[in-house]
Image (cartoon, grey):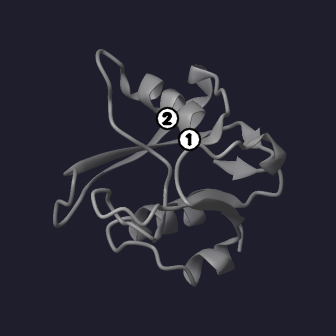
């Protein structure tokens, strides 16, 4: 998700050892529950983690990648949305913090090796440097 100024929204992960990438910058997300499809999962996770209701039709599949090596999961599906968020809309429900970041800022962050290629691909497709 991006804000009105075309900065990318990322989560600073909680420091808990039972989660993937504790204490590092990564994407918001979670796991499929029950009979949800991937869009429903994405919308539910955004609601739980950010307090934002997204229109399911605004969610666009961006990339599927295989974690190498597998950590807590072996595949991750990433969606983007045409909707732009306002930071004032966010009510953080999970994670230690969040930030909206420019491509230059993104290059300096401690982002997990398995996630960085997805973010770099997003920058090349959607963000101007």
Q: Quadrant of the C terminus?
A: bottom right
Query: Residue 112's x, y, as percent?
Result: 38, 72
Residue under label 2, please give it: 45
When the figure is inspected, residue 108 is found, relative to residue 84, above or below; the finding is below
Q: Position of residue 128 (x, y in %)?
A: 71, 67
Residue 105 at least partly seen: yes
Q: Nearer the viewer, residue 82 or 114?
A: 114
Compute the Cα span from label 2 to label 1. 6 Å
Across and down, in percent, residue 70 comes to: 17, 60
Q: Residue at x 38, y 28 (%)?
A: 38
Left/right of residue 64 with respect to residue 27 in the rendered view? left
Residue 70, labelled with which disc? Answer: none
Q: Mark 2 Cα within 10 Å, few/some/many (few <14, many 20+)?
A: many
Q: Mark 1 and mark 2 in contact (Cβ < 8 Å)?
A: yes
Mark 1 neighbour class, 10 Å CA radius: few under 14, some 14 to 19, many 20 or more: some
Residue position marked by numbered label 1 in the rendering: 49
What residue lies at 32% left-to-right and 56% top-to-bottom? 19
Vertical comparison of 56 with 69: above or below: above
What number of labels is visible? 2
Is residue 43 shown above or below 121? above
């Amino acid at each position: 998700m991006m804000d009105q100024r075309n900065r990318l929204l990322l989560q600073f992960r909680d420091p808990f050892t039972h989660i993937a990438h504790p204490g590092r910058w990564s994407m918001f997300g979670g796991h499929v529950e029950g009979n949800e499809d991937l869009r429903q999962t994405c919308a539910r996770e955004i609601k739980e983690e950010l307090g934002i209701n997204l229109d399911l039709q605004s969610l666009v599949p961006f990339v599927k990648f295989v974690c190498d090596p597998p950590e807590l999961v072996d595949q991750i599906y990433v969606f983007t949305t045409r909707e732009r968020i306002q930071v004032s809309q966010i009510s953080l429900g999970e994670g230690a913090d969040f930030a909206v970041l420019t491509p230059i800022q993104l290059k300096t962050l401690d982002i997990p090796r398995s996630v960085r290629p997805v973010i770099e691909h997003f920058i090349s497709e959607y963000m101007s440097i």
